[in-house]
Amino acid sequence: MIINRRVQTLDEFTIQQLRDFPKATGELSSLLRDIGLAAKRVNVEVNKAGLVDILGDAGSMNVQGEEVKKLDIFANNQFVGVLRHGISCAGIGSEELDDVVIFDDEVSNASKYVCLFDPLDGSSNIDVNVSIGTIFSVYRRVSELGKPATEADFLQPGVKQVAAGYIIYGSSTMMVYATRRGVNGFTLDQSIGEFTLSHPDIKCPDSGKFYSVNHGNFFQYEENVRKYINECQKKTKENGGPYTQRYIGSMVADIHRNLIKGGIFMYPAVLDKPKGKLRVMYECNPCAFIIEVAGGIATNGKQRMLEVQPTGLHQRTPFFAGSKLMMEELESFLKGTE
Ligand code: P6P
């Protein structure tokens, strides 16, 4: 029997990782497969979102007489449901839920990990068919195994993440995740309904041509941020440019492009959001982990993003992340040494 080993599915890849680490219990591999399963279910609904009017808008009844849920609530329920009934997660935190959900059953209490999610980031873009995404973060518990998880399991600095990733629902659907061993991307092959390894060992180029920022907020940014943005606009072939401004307004899409092609993403503090807009636990920390493992840099403008000690589940922060050399130039502006 000929086995096609060229194309490795997410399941095969995570099992291969297990073979390389015989002492591993397999819980993390199982958790990542659970996330992949939930992502495939979300993908089905996201792909037909444009048809929602035909199938019944969120809050209404569809042709089958079922209540149609808002997509981000639907996505949240998929990830919570799969992880609650898995063997690897003791609880989750979610942008959609005010407090953490502790699964508190015998199997979940024995699980080593907790997860945080932005189940469907950028969902406001869906009705104009712009790419959106799920972002997730995985921590090893600090509380006693065998007992219910506690809030302390979730409020750990990003440097403690065991894994982090995103699913981008775009021209194709991809799952990208990082562990300390590297960043790998899997594209959903609809013909077999499996995520398949398409971007092994992703590295963020040391420099790039893309800078991503919402220019509409320009005059709300602090002076050094404005100076850096002006510098980006003045780049020429002679000094690493010219740069292109690309800003989709969907964090996963902007981060993904800059991760693959090189670039810098910025969401600075603005007047009506002095602490920034993006969330520490389930947007910035997972993206920072991925970017750092891939060779880039991520900060809150003042310190390494992954070293921020969180104080709240839904805490916001300014966020800057991307190619090493571009981030180093930004940091020289932020320090005022430029
Ligand atoms: P703005 C989407 O609403 C989101 O949370 C991120 O995905 C995105 O990067 C950011 O907000 C866009 O915010 O204020 O530029 O529209």
Image: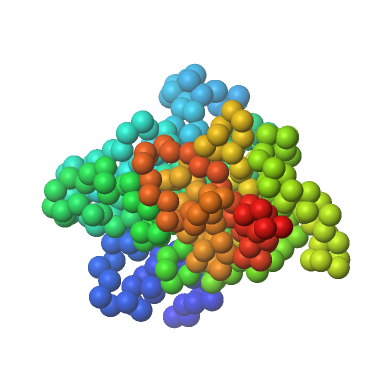
Whether residue 304 is visible here, answered yes or no, is yes
Q: Is residue 262 visible?
A: no
Instruction: Tell me which residue sits at (31%, 38%) in the image.
Output: 100
Q: Position of residue 95 (x, y in %)?
A: 43, 36
Q: Which residue is rendered at x = 54% and y = 67% of the image?
A: 294
Q: Relative to the observer, which residue lies in front, 40 or 111?
A: 111
Quarter of the C terminus within the rendering: bottom right
Rendering coords of residue 137 (x, y %): 41, 52
Residue appearing at x 38%, y 45% in the figure: 310
Looking at the rendering, the quadrant in which ligand 1 lies is top right
| Placement of 153 over or under 64, stated as above or below | below
Give the x, y percent position of residue 304.
49, 57
Residue at image location 33% in from the left, 73% down from the top = 18
Q: Is residue 156 above or below residue 178?
A: above
* Depth order, front residue of 35/66: 35
Q: Nearer the viewer, residue 163 or 300?
A: 300
Q: Seen from this angle, which residue lies furthest right?
A: 237
Is 225 situated left or right of 318 in this image?
A: right
Q: Is residue 145 left or right of residue 58?
A: left
Furthest residue to the top?
60
Residue situated in front as seen by the camera: 94 or 264: 264
